[in-house]
């Protein structure tokens, strides 16, 4: 029906009548549905000739919905790892020339990289997100730990002290279920160990640094420092465990900070600290880019109106107004007192963490690689194979994917 009425809408738009834009967003994380719908109403009030119909789907369905949409969407929310695949599939419009140099300089590089491939832009950065190290201030104080760990070795040492003093049985909790959450965490840890899964466009999975990163993960479980249930946990499980006082450290997305400090949601409200993702001598920090952008599918019959809507949604006005939902893509807004006031601790650490964003492998075959990576890493975490076996086997499969 959409394709059937597309030509009529196009004519109507050129004649000054209403053009309908169909968009697709995700249900959870980042800007809420209420925020998106409220802003959309404001946009339509300012642009009476443009009607916007928003669709919200779970993240797990978003990629498939876009790939099978047959050009029905004018604006689509794109996750960073999908950009190369979507570009190679020829379904995104190149918008490189639509962003000025001034705008580019004011946007965090990590946010831009979410919609960038081979030096071209295929969308406007919109969500700026990554994971942080959350810690229980009271537990650390009780253990006599006065310095928040800045390296993974320091995290393990602090965890040993916490465990030995019986302050918490499993100091660490992770989202290491065989899912994309595991790929996110492995990316952060491997990059912080100096590993790069892709080097010069080719698979580099069995690099010693990548193997050492997996050994770190396995050892934390073997030593009883990481909660063994982490192997079945996703992010909400991590939040629940940490918020119930059953962990001293957790790696999780931005959203957890406010919820873990909310007395209605958490038993550790007021005791939650946030810090940079830990590093190693090879890297100060490395945090997986959770950024997402708003793109225009090539099938859109109203690209000009679509870009106008995208500009509105990604504007400083929108991002300042809804800074409680998600932190801005714009560097200058991190100096805005109203934005800082929404959450001073989070804003200050985010401004620093965004300097160390790393992307999951930016290759068109990332989806296949991620699936195999999840399997290999999971087997190592379960003790079914060694980290060396996991990464050597993954390297062989990745080489075939890259052919």
Image: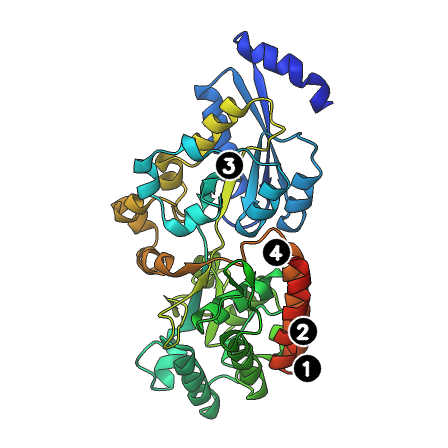
- Labels 1, 3: front one: 1
Question: Where does label 4 land, which residue?
Answer: 366
Q: Between tags 3 and 4, which lies in front?
A: 4
Dots 2, 4 in contact, CB < 8 A: no
Asked if disc 3 and disc 2 are in contact, CB closer than 8 Å, the reply is no
Q: Residue 396 at what x, y percent from top left?
A: 67, 69
Q: CA distance from mark 3 to mark 4?
A: 29 Å
Of the numbered discs 1 and 3, the one sitting upstream in the chain is: 3
Q: CA distance from mark 3 to mark 2?
A: 43 Å
**In the image, which is nearer the foreground, mark 1 or mark 2?**
2
Is any part of residue 349 visible from this angle?
yes
**Vertical comparison of 177 with 2: above or below:** below
Q: Which residue corresponds to the image point at 64% horizontal and 64% vertical from the top-left?
A: 399
Specify the quadrant that holds the N terminus.
top right
Q: Residue at coordinates 46% horizontally, 92% vertically from top-left?
A: 164
Q: State the separation of the CA atoms marked 1 and 3.
A: 45 Å
Q: Secondary structure at mark 1?
A: loop
Reply above or below: 141 against 88: below
Q: Are marks 1 and 2 in contact (CB under 8 Å)?
A: yes
Q: Which residue is mark 3?
A: 36
Front one among 142 and 369: 369
**SS of the residue under disc 3:** helix
Q: Nearer the viewer, residue 320 or 379?
A: 379
Identify residue for label 1: 385
Nearer-the-camera pick, 21 or 394: 394
Q: Which residue of the protein is positioned furthest toward the top in this rendering?
A: 15
The residue beneath circle 2 is 393
Residue 185 position within the rendered picture, expressed as x and y whole percent measured from the top left: 53, 67
């Amino acid at each position: 029906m959409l394709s059937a009425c597309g030509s009529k809408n196009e004519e109507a738009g050129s004649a000054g009548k209403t053009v309908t834009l169909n968009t697709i967003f995700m249900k959870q994380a980042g800007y809420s549905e209420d925020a998106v719908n409220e802003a959309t109403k404001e946009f339509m009030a300012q642009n009476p000739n443009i009607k916007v119909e928003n669709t919200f789907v779970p993240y797990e369905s978003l990629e498939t919905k876009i790939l099978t949409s047959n050009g029905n969407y004018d604006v689509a929310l794109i996750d960073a790892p999908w950009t190369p695949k979507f570009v190679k599939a020829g379904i995104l419009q190149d918008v490189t020339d639509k962003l000025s140099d001034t705008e580019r300089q004011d946007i965090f590089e990590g946010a831009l990289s979410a919609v960038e491939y081979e030096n071209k832009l295929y969308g406007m950065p919109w969500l700026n997100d990554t994971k942080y190290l959350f810690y229980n201030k009271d537990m650390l104080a009780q253990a006599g730990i006065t310095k928040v760990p800045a390296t993974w070795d320091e995290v393990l040492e602090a965890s040993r002290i916490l465990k030995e003093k019986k302050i918490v049985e499993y100091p660490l909790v992770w989202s290491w279920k065989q899912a994309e959450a595991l790929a996110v965490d492995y990316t952060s840890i491997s990059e912080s160990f100096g590993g790069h899964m892709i080097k010069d466009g080719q698979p580099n999975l069995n690099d010693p640094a990548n193997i050492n990163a997996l050994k770190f993960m396995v050892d934390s479980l073997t030593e009883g420092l990481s909660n063994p249930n982490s192997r079945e946990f996703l992010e909400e499980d991590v939040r629940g465990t940490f918020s119930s006082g059953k962990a001293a450290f957790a790696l999780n997305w931005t959203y957890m900070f406010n919820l873990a400090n909310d007395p209605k949601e958490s038993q550790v409200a007021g005791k939650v600290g946030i810090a940079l993702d830990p590093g190693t001598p090879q890297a100060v920090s490395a945090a997986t880019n959770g950024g997402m952008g708003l793109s225009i599918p090539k099938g859109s019959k109203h690209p000009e109106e679509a870009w106008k809507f995208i500009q509105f949604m990604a504007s400083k006005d929108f991002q300042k107004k809804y800074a409680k939902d998600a932190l801005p893509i714009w560097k200058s807004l991190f100096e805005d007192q109203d934005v800082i006031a929404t959450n001073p601790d989070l804003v200050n650490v985010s401004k620093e963490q965004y300097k160390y964003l790393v992307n999951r492998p930016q290759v068109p075959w990332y989806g296949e690689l991620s699936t195999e990576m999840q399997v290999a890493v999971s087997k190592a975490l379960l003790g079914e194979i060694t980290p060396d076996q996991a990464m050597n086997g993954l390297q062989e499969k990745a080489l075939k994917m890259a052919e």
